[in-house]
Amino acid sequence: MRQVFQVDVLERYAAKGRGVITCMSAGNDVIVLGTSKGWLIRHDFGAGDSYDIDLSAGRPGEQSIHKVFVDPGGSHCIATIVGSGGAETFYTHAKWSKPRVLSKLKGLVVNAVAWNRQQITEASTKEIILGTDTGQLHEMAVDEKDKREKYIKLLFELNELPEAFMGLQMETASLSNGTRYYVMAVTPTRLYSFTGFGSLDTVFASYLDRAVHFMELPVMVVFFISELHFFIKQRRAVHFAWLSGAGIYHGGLNFGAQRSYVVKSLLTFSFANILGSSPNGDENFVENKALLSYSKLSEGAEAVKPGSMAVSEYHFLLLMGNKVKVVNRISEQIIEELQFDQTSDSISRGIIGLCSDATAGVFYAYDQNSIFQVSVNDEGRDMWKVYLDMKEYAAALANCRDPLQRDQVYLVQCISLKLMEGVLQINYILSFEEITLKFISVTEQDALRTFLLRKLDNLAKDDKCQITMISTWATELYLDKINRLLLEDDTALENRSSEYQSIIREFRAFLSDCKDVLDEATTMKLLESYGRVEELVFFASLKEQHEIVVHHYIQQGEAKKALQMLRKPAVPIDLQLADLSCLSETIILEKTITDGLPTLQYKFAPDLIMLDAYETVESWMTTNNLNPRKLIPAMMRYSSEPHAKNETHEVIKYLEFCVHRSHNEDPGVHNLLLSLYAKQEDDSALLRFLQCKFGKGRENGPEFFYDPKYALRLCLKEKRMRACVHIYGMMSMHEEAVALALQVDPELAMAEADKVEDDEDLRKKLWLMVAKHVIEQEKGTKRENIRKAIAFLKETDGLLKIEDILPFFPDFALIDDFKEAICSSLDDYNKQIEQLKQEMNDATHGADNIRNDISALAQRYAVIDRDEDCGVCRRKILIAGRDYRMARGYASVGPMAPFYVFPCGHAFHAQCLIAHVTQCTNETQAEYILDLQKQLTLLGSEARKDANGVTTEDSITSMTPTDKLRSQLDDAIASECPFCGDLMIREISLPFIAPEEAHQFASWEIKPQNLGNHRSLSLPV
């Protein structure tokens, strides 16, 4: 097995020729050495660099570093140099190249420094305490940016027994009423403790009026080595050790505790004497104190006193000669001896001392030339054995790391129990069967159960069969114990603190731990046979057998608990509903429902809604992904039961939630809600439901999701006539709607008849049905009936006339009764005739105006300047050139070529205009224009051959085909000016260079000439 402590050479010849090493200190992977020639050598292993500082510069004679101190962060350093010129103390910082002399300490030898670990930073030391060889304590503080100490002042001085302070440690604690300081200091024979609130000045000034708390360990022979060490864990001191002449005095530290002075295991020794103990318990922050005598470390020989010491969490490292003995702090036994690989020139002097780096968690040893690193490898791994040997079982169990170690602790503990006579240790000697039989023979059921539980802890996971059997046996032992306790104590159920309640909690914890290894069916049968219903429900919930749990709650009438169980995420929701046998009478029965396994939400829905309808419906509304269709059996069962008149119908509430808030589109859900509305006395809710358009806003989707035929059949059965009227109208059966509405309310019939808008004949037919009903139902006098009929006509907004309703009156009705209505109707017809005449006159007048406009258009003319140019070819319009031929299809106008003039002033030759328009317009239009021009040419030549110069009257008065073609051509090319109309606007989007002009564009490219064949000629200047 690997050793707990291991030694490695860290640095050979670390003094770098600056003399030999006299002292050393470390912190945060930084080591500072003091040499015999007055040099400080700093090694920063974290940064990987080192440098030297000469403290002897300017001092006469031989100079040697007496002590060096480094703070836990490795930034601050204090060193004392001693020579023929006296002693001087220096301070230096990791960033400084030159040290600072602490002039106020001149002549004083600093033996110890206490750093303020809780408050010190890289930039400031905060308050630190320095102990001198004259028995004085000084306070000092340094800020790195000031390059000098802030102050140095005397705190305390030993007057009664002036001795040198050899070790100092300080801790602070931030409490609600301020900062509290704890200071420990040692001399060769005494350990002093100081504590108080405020500043260090205040703390030490208080001891002017009270006795100083100290412990004295006098020795027969003067022992000049005295060291004080704290073990630091997470920047807080946990325990201390004082290397004194009488032995190693050590104990725990409890800062801030208000305890009396108690010595738990202080070893007695004849020369120990406690002096000056203060009655004030505040100063007693040390507990569990003990003294380790050096005689224990010498094995019968003369006691050898250590030359130096270091403290780890569980061990002391004691330098004895050229080796280090590692002593367990708890058992006070030597566990290892460390040897050092020294160079030949250093063996004679041996190892000089030890130091620790609390921040890095390593230890160092040094001789005259070399530095050795002592590493720690899991020093707490065997501490459970140490505590076990000392019979401190609780501490041993706390330090165990695996079940095997815990079993060994339990074994030794059982051996110490007289009742068991060490029965459990036979687990390592006898078989499992022999051990269990032993327990049964002595009727130790509790011990047997304990043994089985321990056995379970030791079994490997692969022993599944044995684990299941032992777990089942333990289950039965638990049940037997529970029943025996119930028989022994009748008040066990009510007494919360009884053993019965304790064993119940233990048994439930066991079930929770073993739920995966216990056989489900066997365990449930056991629980049922012992009548442990609550434990059965508990185990069922562990095994996620929610059906058993919910069924139990329903039997107990606890609907809320059952619903809470069903709302757990592990309970499945969307599989299938339970038995549908309770469905009847409605169309819902005709809908096919997907087959599958029933789930608990749907299986227990009928029972739960009958048990507590309100809570059940509230649970449904808060459960996501619940399919209302699968709850229809439960809702039908609830709806079939009678309810109080003013009672809220919970199923209707849930269905309204599904339809209006969850936007459910299931026809079965809508049909059920409609059927429940239809059975209510008040039909207002039914009418509102029918008028809602649930699918409004969807493309190609239905406006409603219920079955209208089923709804109509149901409403007729329940005699909900207004609803039937609405459904007839929704199904476009308007005649049936009006006919039924007339039986209920004529006003409703009128409203229904008025809904038809796109079919005037049907609308008139519906109104005639209403009129016939109104006339036939009137029971008043004849004249009164006629008056009401005439009033009814006015409500139709002119759709019906008096002649439409006359057939509905009896044949013996006198015409005098209709005189006013007939006259009014005739007046309306006269007005319509006059209006038609006026419209005819207006049309005739409009036709005359059009003819006049046509005649005026034929006489239009435009004035052309003789110098006017063609907009395309830029030649004169009125001067015929030789290059112009007669335009095809145009009559010659003297010596001039045909041309077009536009109101905007632009003029174009006919041939130029045709060419320009065909070039700028699209391909289809261009072909159309060219085709018209071709037809004109052909017709023109034929006309000249046939006419032979003879003109008839018909040719003058009628439009010839040539004229029609010329008119079409004019419309195609001259409907607007090509420079001012849409044609020019469309040209804006065309490219500057057309695709067919690409070759011309390419010709514009400037290509570089080949200058390779040209020779340059140099001209003489």
Image (cartoon, rainbow, N blue to C red):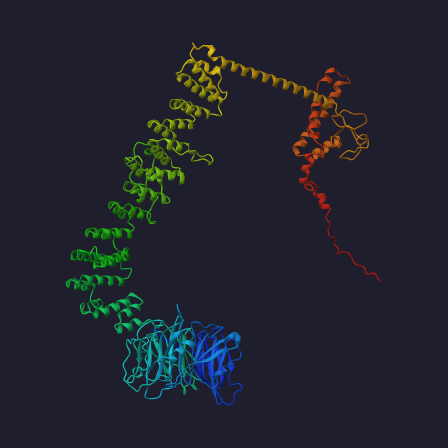
Most distant residue in the left direction: 441
Q: Front-most of 404 and 982?
A: 982
Q: Front-most of 105 and 334?
A: 105
Q: Front-most of 395 and 875?
A: 395
Most distant residue in the right direction: 1021
Quadrant containing the N terminus is: bottom left
Position of 79 with respect to 564 (left or right) is right
Q: Residue at x 40, y 28 (%)?
A: 727
Q: Position of residue 466 (x, y in %)?
A: 24, 59
Quadrant containing the C terminus is: bottom right
Q: Front-most of 347 and 601?
A: 601
Position of 195 with respect to 877 (left or right) is left
Q: Position of residue 857 (x, y in %)?
A: 72, 24
Position of 909 with respect to 571 (left or right) is right
Asked if residue 986 can be seen in this view, the reply is: yes
Relative vertical location of residue 284 with respect to residue 723 in this rendering, above or below: below
Most distant residue in the front direction: 209
Relative vertical location of residue 78 with respect to residue 936 in this rendering, above or below: below
Q: Position of residue 128 (x, y in %)?
A: 44, 77
Counting labels gives 0
Relative vertical location of residue 807 with respect to residue 528 in this rendering, above or below: above
Q: Position of residue 173 (x, y in %)?
A: 39, 71
Position of 499 with respect to 938 (left or right) is left
Relative vertical location of residue 452 with respect to residue 118 in this rendering, above or below: above
Quadrant in the picture for residue 267: bottom left
Quadrant in the picture for residue 256: bottom left
